[in-house]
Image: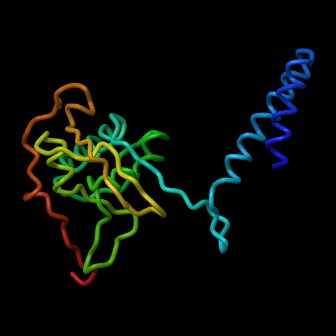
């Protein structure tokens, strides 16, 4: 393969070159290695998107985002929130959807229709925060859908490496979304 031959030649040239040439060759070599790796991946013939499965680990950062959801829901008295209500930082905002992959939050539905940008904490999310259940350490996704779960199970204490610091009064039976009607 042409790319592999170029990489071999670059290794030889890099050893024989001066410092500046060496740096340029190293950058080019890294670029070629990345392109070679991408050549081995599969791409969709229709859209050109990568056909790749991803693993998503439950992390302390994700757990802290879930705590922010809980704190907001508790203060409002209803299990309904929007991401904008939570004042998430850049990292929390970008990784927020991973909570859905773990089944800790869900999109809010009314009469079977998803409400735009509205979320709820699931019973599983509440039980995880209370430390009552274990969840898979990682989930595997493909095209934004969960396709597999890790065999390793973890609790909130293991993820945070400390005991939960909130009270154990997480009662979701009283936090039901309020249905409003425009006709009232």
49 relative position to 111: left or right: right
Taking the image as drawn, is residue 100 in sight? no
Q: Nearer the viewer, residue 70 or 45?
A: 45
User: Residue 113, located in which quarter of the rendered image?
Assistant: bottom left
For image coordinates 25% across by 80% down, the residue present is: 111
Q: Quadrant of the C terminus?
A: bottom left
Q: Is residue 104 placed above or below 116 in the rendered structure?
A: above
Q: Nearer the viewer, residue 93 or 76?
A: 93
Q: Nearer the viewer, residue 109 or 78?
A: 109
For image coordinates 11% across by 46% down, the residue present is: 170
For image coordinates 17% across by 31% down, the residue present is: 164
Spot occupied by residue 39 in the image (x, y as percentages of width and height):
71, 53
User: Residue 172, located in which quarter of the rendered image?
Assistant: bottom left
Q: Nearer the viewer, residue 13 or 116?
A: 13
Q: Is residue 147 placed above or below 8 in the rendered structure?
A: below
Spot occupied by residue 79 in the image (x, y as percentages of width and height):
20, 57
For image coordinates 91% across by 18% down, the residue present is: 16
Spot occupied by residue 54 in the image (x, y as percentages of width and height):
47, 52
Q: How is the image coloured?
A: rainbow
Q: Is residue 109 placed above or below 143 in the rendered structure?
A: below
Taking the image as drawn, is residue 45 in sight? yes
153 relative position to 40: left or right: left
- Report the residue that reaches farthest toward the top: 19
Spot occupied by residue 124 in the image (x, y as percentages of width and height):
18, 53
152 relative position to 35: left or right: left
- Report the residue that reaches farthest toward the bottom: 183
39 relative position to 88: left or right: right
| Number of marks drawn | 0
């Amino acid at each position: 393969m042409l790319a592999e031959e170029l990489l071999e030649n670059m290794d030889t040239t890099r050893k024989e070159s001066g410092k500046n040439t060496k740096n340029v060759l190293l950058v080019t070599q890294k670029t070629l290695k990345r392109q070679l790796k991408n050549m081995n991946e599969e791409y969709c013939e229709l859209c050109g998107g990568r056909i790749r499965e991803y693993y998503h680990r439950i992390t302390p950062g994700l757990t802290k985002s879930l705590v922010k959801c809980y704190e907001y829901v508790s203060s409002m008295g209803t299990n309904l929130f929007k991401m904008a209500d939570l004042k998430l930082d850049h990292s929390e905002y970008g990784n927020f959807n991973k909570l859905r992959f773990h089944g800790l939050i869900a999109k809010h539905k009314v009469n079977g229709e998803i409400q735009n940008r509205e979320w709820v904490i699931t019973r599983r999310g509440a039980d995880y925060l209370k430390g009552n259940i274990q969840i898979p350490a990682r989930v595997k996704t493909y095209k934004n859908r969960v396709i597999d779960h890790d065999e390793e199970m973890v609790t909130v204490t293991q993820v945070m490496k400390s005991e939960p610091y909130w009270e154990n009064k997480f009662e979701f039976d009283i936090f039901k979304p309020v249905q409003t009607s425009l006709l009232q």
